[in-house]
Image (tube, grey):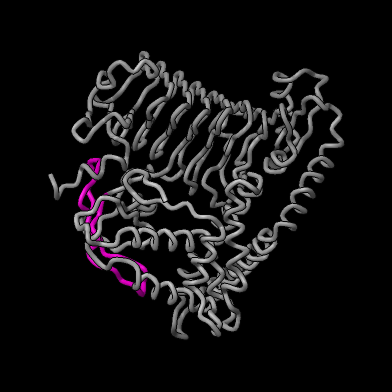
Amino acid sequence: MSEHMNIYTFHESFEERLEEYIEILTTEGKVIPASQIHEEWSCDVELVIEPVGWQAFWNIPRSTCENYHIRYPTVVLVEVLGTDYPTLCASVKITAVQDDIQLPEKHEVPLIELYPTIKQKNTSLDILGTAHCVDRLRLFYNHLWMPWDEDDDDDIDWVDQHLRSRLRLYYDMQGVINKETCDIIKSLLSEGREIRNKITILECALPDDDDAPQEELAKETCALMQLHLRLQQIKAEIDVLENPQMRDLLWKNRSLEKKKKRSNNTDKDKSYYLVWEGGTVKQLQEVSNKIHTMLPEDMSIKICGYLEDVLDISEVGDTILLGEGKHPIKHSSGLGEKGTIIGIHDTEKVILSPRESDVSSSLLNFHGTEILLKNICIDLEELQAGIIIRKDCTAVMTNCRICVSSTNPSSVKWGVIAMPGAKLVFNKTVFQGLGTAVVTYATSEVILNECRFEQCYEGVRLTDNVRFTATECSFNKIESCAVVMESETVNRSGTKIGSEEIFGEISEISFNECKFDKEKSFMLKPKSASALMTLNKTES
């Protein structure tokens, strides 16, 4: 157990977690099926968790942030007014907010969204036991309980059938399993949860009477059947991936298949691919003319119909040319160690977007050395983020657009995320309709040249130990602040809104000849959760 951001966090081994869950979810001589698991948790929660009067941080989920049109993530301090054990929920009252946001005072929230604070008004409460119980519950329902479990037969013991293998999978994903396989598992589970939600909504909407239009009923029934079939496919894939031996075998086979697909490539140093969805002879001639201006005449090039297929076989240093059209991809496909994607038409006509069923966290996830993107429009659609750039990777984007295609700007979607140690260079790139266009983490570096930010909730979110330079950029119709700096050096009374001058003498951050449509476009504030304890309105 450790203290972090004034909350309890628990770091337990596989054996410790396994023993705890077995104690909670098993009864000697009795089969506990999946349909009984929720009730077992209700009993444990009622025995351990304090029913009322404790303080916690509420990590507001993305969907709720979007409903109230506030930035994501948003964390507020709450007091628990009561606990509904059968539903594993709590009634809470908001007692402190950090940003200038408007929210109803009282809410019903799942216990797993609450993080009990170390500091409590009532010191007689068993807050450590409460925090530990909530932590166990959160890990179980976020990582061990699957969206198809409720369909299990009642004669199958859930603990015997699933607990050990799923807990082992969770721990293996913290470092044992390779990143690509982890991404596949996470994507499958996210899709499964999304499908389960859709099934629930459709089943509730089915008419109870026989007078409903038969055509409409048949359509909804068919949609339900397709969702159930896809859920069973995902279940079968996850069942295989839970087995360590099968995981290793599939990974080796995937690597061999990739090498086999590359074996016909005559240029071992560098390959060029054209992704073209097809068209008339005249259109093919136009595409050919454009490529002639970009590549030497004797350069070998392969034509493919789908970007996803090319990303699957591309290797270090390859270049992908994208023709006009919408190019859907899935599983946060990347370019490996190094590569280039160039649109050969106007930016608005070359669109990267997620597949309809994709519920990954981001569209692109780069972890190589150098990635170049040019003349590309990246449309997030329903995804949470556009691009994630990881440690030691440099991403250079020129004449691109990162946006959300819906007519209403989103307050929760992120355009580009610079993880610690990443470097981003944007030239003449447009960010449109996003929650936060650029999110930075400590030790990252971001350079913006002649970029435009339009109709975003926030432009750039900075933090301590970040190198940031913006030159000749414009920020228009930004709902909150164009630039938000979160710093651990700022206390509760130090939040400031104004011009660039409020950042003081921070040499690593500079704005050169940038244009803002608001006089007060900069905000300097405390770290999101660290200052909430001192912002408690009931104590001030």
x and y percent of residue 404 in the render? Answer: 45, 41
User: Which contiguous range is marked in magenta?
Assistant: 77-103
Residue at image x 38%, y 27%? Answer: 464
Residue at image x 47%, y 26%? Answer: 443
Closer to the camera in the image, 217 or 404: 404
Residue at the left extreme? 540
Q: Is residue 94 magenta?
A: yes
430 relative to 62, above or below: above
Q: Quadrant of residue 323?
A: top right
x and y percent of residue 167 in the render? Answer: 57, 61
Q: Is residue 53 magenta?
A: no
Quadrant assignment for the C terminus? top left
Q: Residue 311 vs residue 134: left or right?
A: right
Residue at image x 66%, y 64%? Answer: 239
Closer to the camera in the image, 481 or 224: 481
x and y percent of residue 48 in the render? Answer: 35, 68
x and y percent of residue 452 in the render? Answer: 41, 25
**Can you see residue 195?**
no
